[in-house]
Each structure stands twice: as C-alpha cells, then as structure tokens.
Image (cartoon, rainbow, N blue to C red):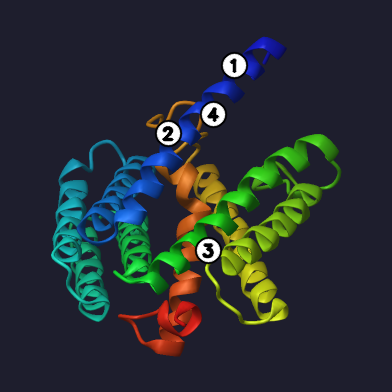
Amino acid sequence: MTKGAGRSNLQQRVLSAIVLVAVVLVLTWAGGFWYRILCAGIAGAVLYEWTAMASPRDATAHRIVLWGLLAVVLAMLLAGVSAATLLIALVVAVIVGAAHAAYDQRGFWPVAGVAYAGLSAISLAALRSDDAAGLAATLFLFAIVWATDILAYFVGRAIGGPKLAPSISPGKTWSGAIGGTIAGIVAGGAIALYAGIVWGALATASLALILSIVSQIGDLFESSLKRRFGTKDSSGLIPGHGGVMDRVDGLVAAAFMLFIIGAAASGLDAPANALFGR
C-alpha cells in the first residue's frame, strides 16, 4: 500500500468511525426500544456475516432457517421480553438450528453464529436497561472498549515490537495490547468518575482491566474465525473498517463478560444495578 493510499484509508476509517459512534451514542442515550433496535441490528448483521463466512454457498436453506430462528429471538428482544426468557429462547433456537444442521448434513459452525449473535444482543440490551445505572454501565463499557481499540492500533503502529499472536493476527503487538489496556483503564475510570460512581480506584481499575483484556480476546477470536474460513474482512459493510463483526468483536465479548458479572451480582434483568446503581 502506498503512503497516499494508507492516508486515504485512515481518513475513511476515521470518518466512518465518527458517524458510527454518533449513531450509537444517540441510540444509547435514547434507550428503550430505540436502543434495542441497535442491539437487534448488530446481531442481525453479525449472523449475516458469520453465516456468509462459515457456510458453503449451497447452504441457502440452512442459512434461512438460522436467520429465521434468530429473528424470533430478536423480535422478543424488541418487545421487551426479560433476559431470562430471551436466554431460554436462544437455547431453543440453537438446539433447533443444530438439529436442522444434522438433518441437512451441515457443519455446526453456522449454528454457533446464532448463539454468538443472540448473546451479543441480549448482553448489550440487558446492560442498558432503562435507567441511569444502565446508561452508566453501557457508557463505561463503550469507553473501555473504544479506548482499548484505538490506542492499541496507534501505539502498536508507533512502537511495534514483539507480535501478540502472529499465527492469528500478525498486525497486533504486545506494545499495542499494553497501550490499549492502559487506555481502557483510564477511560473506564473517567466514566466512573463522571457518573459519580465511587467503588474505589482499585475496584474500578480491576473491572476496566478485565473488560479491556476480554475485548482484545474477542478481537483475536474473530481474527481466528476469519483465518479459519480464509476471509480478510467479515464483509465490506463499513467503509474503511470491513464488516460489522470487525468493529464489534471486542465490544460483544466485553459486554457478555460485564453481563455475567452484573447478573451474578444483581440478577439477569438488572445486571447494571449492583455495579452502577447508587
């Protein structure tokens, strides 16, 4: 790639990112049904890209079945059904999808996409809920993941050094991972301070550290998936970035982790309350 082409690609990435962040923040602030539309849209795009990568071209009927199964779960999510009920519906959808895969003599990787996409939507929606704690939890999550992603990219390019996982993602470095993690901790602390949440510096830093690391693991998981199926980008839906999965891989992994931590503390339907309620 020439220097001019690289600069043009970076400009395209930045412009796309600004538009996406603006849309996401507006819908997140609105909450309720509008935010659930965002979650459902992410999940639908993720499954579309996943099945495009993981299923053969002649598996159209199987893909339609999987899309239909996820559509039922997402319709329930849009209707405001509880997280517990959504998780049960998702388990049923995965079982039905697996049964169809066995009947149609297809592999089970496409079915795994239903679980991945469904858990992504459920985790993000449950964390936001419709109160101040949900908004704080979601902004805390976004700040950590976005800061980690951005600083990992720029620090890695500036410093370079040993590769983080050369067999999975040759472009990622330890310097980028460490720089991104530090940025994630700082960003998480800033949001916690702004929201008036007082856990203590150690607790805030520990939670931000966990989410930053998990987001990077989610990024590596998606990279390994693309490598497995011989794909550079999950799709070309987002100019300069590739596909939706390429942008939300770290986010959905961190969201699921925060959902698990919060649900263990205050229940499936109010995972933000124990950590972000006042």
Q: What secondary structure is marked by label 2? A: helix
Q: Nearer the viewer, mark 1 or mark 3?
A: 3
Q: Residues within 10 Å of mark 3 (few under 14, many from 20)?
A: many
- CA–CA distance between discs 4 and 3? 23 Å
Q: Which residue lies at the image location 23% right of the left edge and 38% below the top edge? A: 58
Task: Tell me if label 1 and label 3 are in contact, CB under 8 Å.
Answer: no
Image disc number at residue 19? 2
Residues marked 4 and 1 touching at CB (< 8 Å): no
Q: Amino acid at mark 3?
A: Phe
- Quote the CA–CA distance across marks 3 and 2: 20 Å
Image location of residue 100, percent across then percent down = 18, 61
Amino acid found under the numbered disc labelled 1: Ser
The answer to whether residue 92 is left or right of residue 252 is left
Q: Is residue 259 above or below residue 30?
A: below
Tell whether 230 sits left or right of 80: right
> For the residue marked with disc 2, what is the amino acid?
Val
Q: Which mark is residue 140?
A: 3
Name the kind of residue labelled 4 in the image. Arg
Number of numbered discs present?
Answer: 4
Q: Position of residue 194 (x, y in %)?
A: 57, 64
Looking at the image, tell me whether mark 1 or mark 3 is earlier in sequence order: 1
Which residue is tagged 1?
8
Q: CB of mark 4 within 8 Å of CB of mark 2? A: no
